[in-house]
Image (cartoon, rainbow, N blue to C red):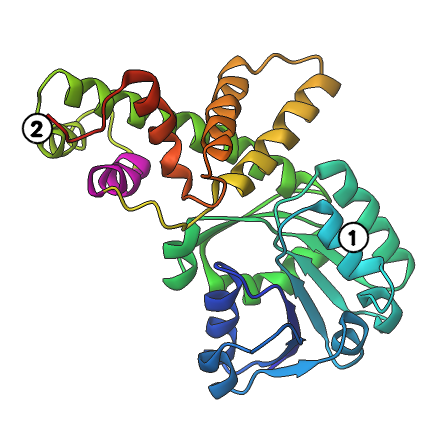
Amino acid sequence: MSKIGFIGLGIMGRPMAGHLLDAGHELTTVKRGSLDETLASKGMKELDNPKAVAEGAEVVITIVPDTPDVEEVLFGEGGVIEGLKPGTLVIDMSSIAPLATQEFAKRIHDAGGEYVDAPVSGGEGGAINAALTIMVGATQEGFERANPLLEIMGKTITHIGGHGAGQTCKVANQIVVALTIEAVSEGLLFASKAGADVSKVRESLLGGLAQSKILDVHGQRMIDRTFDPGFKIKLHQKDLNLALEGARSLDLALPGTANAQQLFQACAANGGADWDHAGILRALERLADHEVGSR
């Protein structure tokens, strides 16, 4: 059993923390309003700030929205670094900038800790089912220390390379996911406006080369028109910003990524920043003056 500080109890973090509690680990978090009743019933405790969480922990796990949020949790006033003990393992499972991650790792190392970047993919369903894909940037020692905990929360865990490599892989993942969601949206919209039964089109496509998890899960979301967030558009926008900023620094053109970002922005401009990212369909529907499944 490990004493774990877990900071970030959002859509993904809540079930991930629950799995660690179910495995017998002792968890604390930072007090933010009312603690989830399920986590409280499993023994999770609240403390005043990240410093207090770190003081009582052997491992600190963070999963918060963006790079500045990670920086604030780790290095802000009352941050993790103020309570860090020598040898503490810090695992950041947020999706943030790779270069900033390298700097955070250096600062934690200089303070006597071990840093691991371990962003995740798989959405709310993957978190609930402990089936996440986890992309790890760490030293070999850091990976070996973190892996038993990561295996409780995920199904596919890959040590990509050194610090920042996990975040680089996650940015690549978000490019592929965004473009695939857009492709599924366009395909189903085309089929619907042409008068085909989109449910049967999706079923047929799942048996051919176009099959994908996104066609399976998000394609059904689009047909059912259920856009409550498993992963919010505004968070995917943040990830594509990282991709496009990185592309500029690498003298790299990512035209598909830029187009997907514009469609996400169209959703956000129409009140959809908190829609599930499958809601990119709604931007395309507005351009087509047609909703999937309508006649």
Q: How crowded is mark 1: few (under 14 residues within 10 Å), some or many (20 or more)?
A: some
Q: In this view, does 191 lie above or below 152?
A: above
Q: Residue 35: name its quadrant.
A: bottom right
Residue located 71% across and 41% down the image: 164
Label for residue 217? Answer: none
Whole-percent x, y for residue 72 in the image: 79, 56
Across the whole image, how many numbered discs are drawn on residues? 2
Graded by Cα atoms within 10 Å as few (under 14), some (14 to 19) or many (20 or more), the crowding at tag 2 reads: some
Which residue in the protein does label 2 denote? Answer: 197
Question: Given this view, does label 1 or label 2 mark the residue nearer the observer?
Answer: 2
Q: Is mark 1 on a helix, strand or loop?
A: helix
| Three-letter residue code for mark 2 | Asp
Which corner quadrant holds the N terminus?
A: bottom right
Residue 214 falls inside the magenta stretch = yes
Asked whether residue 152 is in view, the answer is: no
Q: Where are the magenta residues, as a range?
A: 213-224
Instruction: Confirm whether the magenta stretch covers residue 163.
Output: no
Q: Which of marks 1 and 2 is nearer the N terminus?
A: 1
Element type at mark 2: loop
Above or below, 125 relative to 38 = above
| Residue 58 percent coordinates (x, y) | 72, 75
The residue nearer to you, when weighing 195 against 171, is 195
Q: Locate residue 119 relative to residue 85 in the image: left or right.
A: left
- The residue nearer to you, when weighing 138 against 269, is 269
Which residue was labeled with disc 1?
71
Question: Which quadrant does the C terminus fall into?
Answer: top left
